[in-house]
Amino acid sequence: MAKSASASTEVAVKVAVKVVDAAVHPLVKNANDLRDYLQEPWRSRPFPGPERYFYPHPTGEYRADARPAEGLPGSDPTLLAGQLFDQAGVDYAILLPLTRGLLPDVDLAAAICAATNDWLADTWLSKYNQHGRFRGTLRISPGDPAQAVREIERWAGHPHFVQIGITMQAHHPYGQRQYFPIWETAAKHGLPVVIHADGGSSVDFWPTPAGYLTHFIEYSTFYPINFAYHLASFLAEGVFDRLERFVVVFADGAHDMLAPLIWRMDKDWRPTRHEMPWMQHLPTAYLRDHVRFCAHRLEGPDDPAMLAEWLEIGDAGSLLMFASNYPQWDYFDPRQAFHGIPDALRQRIMCENARALYKLPATRPA
């Protein structure tokens, strides 16, 4: 007599994705660990470490509990996952490792970016990514566009690299023609380009057009406005007109300054169209298709009603993405972010804008 058996199937439990963290900064465990991924002659050469000394925060660069028993803050994937995923409720973390800023030797800068990509792919995107909730940023050095294009092509097929990272510091605004092959390659592969300040441990320009500041508060308040020079350049040089799929992410905050700055550009567009015949639309009309911002904890009004109004003025429902900035001192806890604003707007900022940009699923394994 045949034995009756009931087939049991294991169904993986899925949970809805509610929080995508668009800027998490992992570090190597020890300052010299990146050397293991450098080729010679760079491995034997001196280069700056990962910690900044240019306008450092006066009470420390990192949140106090992000430092593991051994290693630099942000270097322990288990601690990071526990604090972001288990405690704070983040579903996916977009890893944005910093490099060494604007180095005078463009070959060294390119080598450090390549080593950073090898390190991230070997560790956080594979060995430490069994849960599948880390996505990575492919670092390039725009100072040598040919090397930057080759580095993008080297990694473009990797399933977990979801964007390209460059420094806010540059020798020329990023819309200018020498950079165009980089943006063309990024657009070809559907990879957004994220711009984040990466100085403080290397050669650096003065942080304002008026020169060097004295105090950290001056630097942290006004440095993010440098995004506007790059955005104006992308617009005026026609990069967005030529590349329909090109998207740039400004990851150092400053969304709260966008509206008045772009309005000023709008006012000059019509009377100067003869100078830029390729620019077919008002500057504001390009933002939804081509520009995103990462949120910052200390930006905007504290009053929820005023904040909601300011977010609406800046079209945050389309342009703004939540970012914790972990493990930095200004860590933005998602459990405390954007409460008191309309639920639909909060969902767009906390999840949907980043999920759409980085092509993340609507659910993840529990």
Image (cartoon, helix red, strand yellow):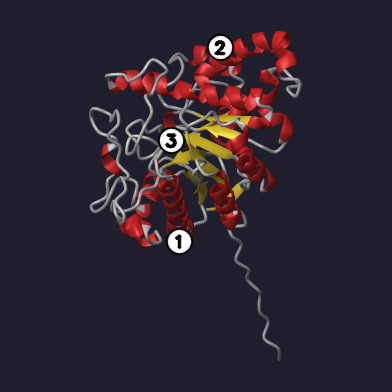
Horizontal and vertical percent for residue 118?
46, 58
Judging by the rendered image, the residue that carries numbered circle 1 is 122
Which residue is tagged 2? 260
Side of 59 relative to 24 (left or right): left
Residue 246 locus on image (x, y percent): 66, 37
x, y percent for residue 28: 34, 52
Q: Earlier in the sequence, mark 3 or mark 1?
A: 1
Quadrant of the drawing holding the N terminus: bottom right
- The type of residue carrying mark 3 is Ser
Residue 344 visible in rendering: no
The tag earlier along the polypeptide, 3 or 2, is 2
Q: Residue under circle 3? A: 324
Give the amino acid at mark 2.
Pro
Q: Tag 1: residue type? A: Asp
Does the CB distance between marks 2 and 1 fall below 8 Å? no
Left of 10 or right of it: where is 121? left
Residue drawn at (73%, 33%) of the image:
242
**Secondary structure category for the residue under label 2:** helix
Query: How far apart, in angstroms, are the residues tagged by discs 2 and 1?
Result: 43 Å
> Which element type, helix, strand or loop, lies under badge 1?
helix
Foreground residue among 335 and 157: 157
- Looking at this view, is 145 or 208 the one in front? 145
Tell me the residue at 35%/55% (across/down). Answer: 34
State which quadrant residue 237 falls in. Answer: top right
**In the image shown, does 255 or 16 lie closer to the viewer?**
255
Instruction: Please give the name of the residue rendered at 67% of the width and 86% of the height, measured from the top-left corner.
Output: 3
The residues bearing labels 3 and 1 have C-alpha atoms spaced at a distance of 24 Å
Of the two numbered discs 2 and 1 on the same chain, state the one appearing first in sequence. 1
Vertical side of 4 occupied by 278: above or below: above
Q: Number of marks in the image?
A: 3
